[in-house]
Amino acid sequence: MSFQNPVFIPGPTNIPESLRKSCDMPTIDHRSPLFGGILNAARDGVRQVLKSATAEVFIFPATGTGGWETALTNTLSPGDTVLAARNGMFSHRWIDMCQRLGLTVRVVETPWGQGIPHDQFAEILAADTSHEIKAVLATHNETATGVTSDIAAVRAAMDGSDHPAMLFVDGVSSIGSIDFQFDDWGVDVAVTGSQKGFMLPAGLAIVGFSAKAMAAQPSAQLPRTFFDIRDMADGYAAGAYPYTPAVGLMNGLSHACTMLLSEGLDTVFARHHRIASGVRAAVSAWGLELCAASPDLYSDTVSAIRTPAGFDASRIVSHAATTYGVAFGGGLGEVAGKVFRIGHLGSLTDVMALSGIATAEMCMADHGLDITLGSGVAAAQDVYRAHGAANVQKD
Ligand code: PLP
């Protein structure tokens, strides 16, 4: 089997060669000071990527889903109420986890393609005068629909009624690619994984806890063992781990943070925005629409593209894989068969994006869709050249 790069799935993302090498290391004694150095560097790096001065960062050998569970089980008790909007597959899955853990979820059903309805959240929180709601769950970037929600507005909705609930944010497909402001947004738990913005293989659940979330931990009654942050914190105090760490991945994470921070977070976010704008220009040149309902919701990490009614969008994904060796994302849940997704996050450049756009065009033309070959590529080139042309030295 041959592996084709780049991939255009919205995670796992392309792994830069230097990070692949950082993960590929000889065995070390994970109870030696050598490991403490890797652990501390990774935790410090993540804290900076989260834009936090004080977040307690925990790194588990797991994935983003384990991060969700870490957030919930370390802070809440059976029967506690949480507030969440269901606007895509990942918010749905987090709600499902809450329900399976025995939490009560106030679900705000939200059309897929819309963002978190913070106005409705404000009303619900204001009416909750007895403070039944213990946590507000927010999926920053709905990877299924390509929708980025306004977390500052969710925080404002909470502050508007001085509601004391904690704010838990799923940043699995945003952190390290789209601006994320842990401290300024008053996030209590941020959740992500290694395989998206951090450009690593899957295998790490990465979470940041605020002082308030840490303080909720002693009284939280939900059962937890593997994801107990008390055990993790005890290990960290000794520069170690409560069990065997994924040392290579942690070393990769520390290097990934160095890469992101040395490129500069604002430059990283601007690169994602530019690449995404090129993809969006291509989509509009094709005469197609995004699943995201309006420009303020457009995601800079993934575009979910609606194909014409009656056409099964999954045919684009399978054709791209089998014919051109290129991986796009399929539609999930409610939008299965209606959208295909171009992931544009992580280690990606403008010209890499052009190859994905060109492939999507070929796949759609191969299926007889009314697409002018080159139209999307040209539209994206215009976006990318606006940046490139600015760099040309004038005589
Ligand atoms: N949340 C979001 C927004 C995601 O995109 C994903 C995975 O794609 C998850 C959570 C689940 O993460 P994982 O697959 O790493 O468990």
Image (spheres, rainbow, N blue to C red):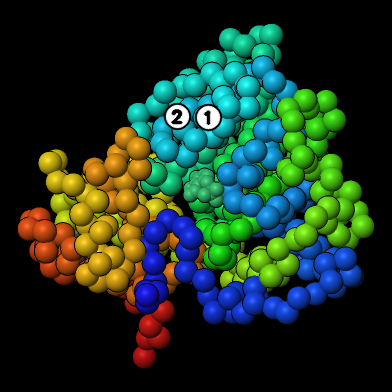
Q: Residues at badges 2 and 1 in contact (C-beta under 8 Å)?
A: yes
Q: Is residue 71 visible?
A: yes
Q: Quadrant of residue 348?
A: bottom left
Image position of 252 (left or right of 83): right
Label 2, secondary structure: give it: strand
Say above or below: 207 vs 166: below
Q: Quadrant of residue 309?
A: top left
**In the displayed structure, does residue 229 sit left or right of residue 374?**
right
Label 1 is placed on what type of residue? Ile
Q: Position of residue 201 (x, y in %)?
A: 56, 64
Quadrant in which the C terminus is drawn: bottom left
Q: Say which label, 2 or 1, has the lower sequence index.
A: 2
Is residue 75 in view from this perspective?
no
197 relative to 340, above or below:
below
Total residue callouts: 2
Q: Position of residue 311 (x, y in %)?
A: 14, 46
The answer to whether 254 is drawn above or below residue 293 in the figure is: below
Q: Which mark is residue 86?
A: 2
Residue reaching furthest right? 238
Q: Nearer the viewer, residue 234 or 134?
A: 234
Within 10 Å of disc 2 (Cα), the crowding (few <14, some 14-19, many 20+) is many
Q: Amino acid at mark 2?
A: Arg
Residue at point 62% right, 40% down?
Answer: 68
Which residue reaches farthest bottom? 395
Q: CA distance from mark 2 to mark 1?
A: 8 Å
Q: What is the quadrant of the N terminus in the image?
A: bottom left
| Residue identifier under label 1 | 95
> Which residue is at a point 54% across and 79% down the rendered structure image?
17
Camera-nearest label, 2 or 1: 1
Q: Position of residue 97 (x, y in %)?
A: 56, 32
Query: Dot 1 lies on which element?
Result: helix
Could you classify mark 1 by the number of other residues whose Cα lies within 10 Å: few (under 14), some (14-19), or many (20 or more)?
Answer: many
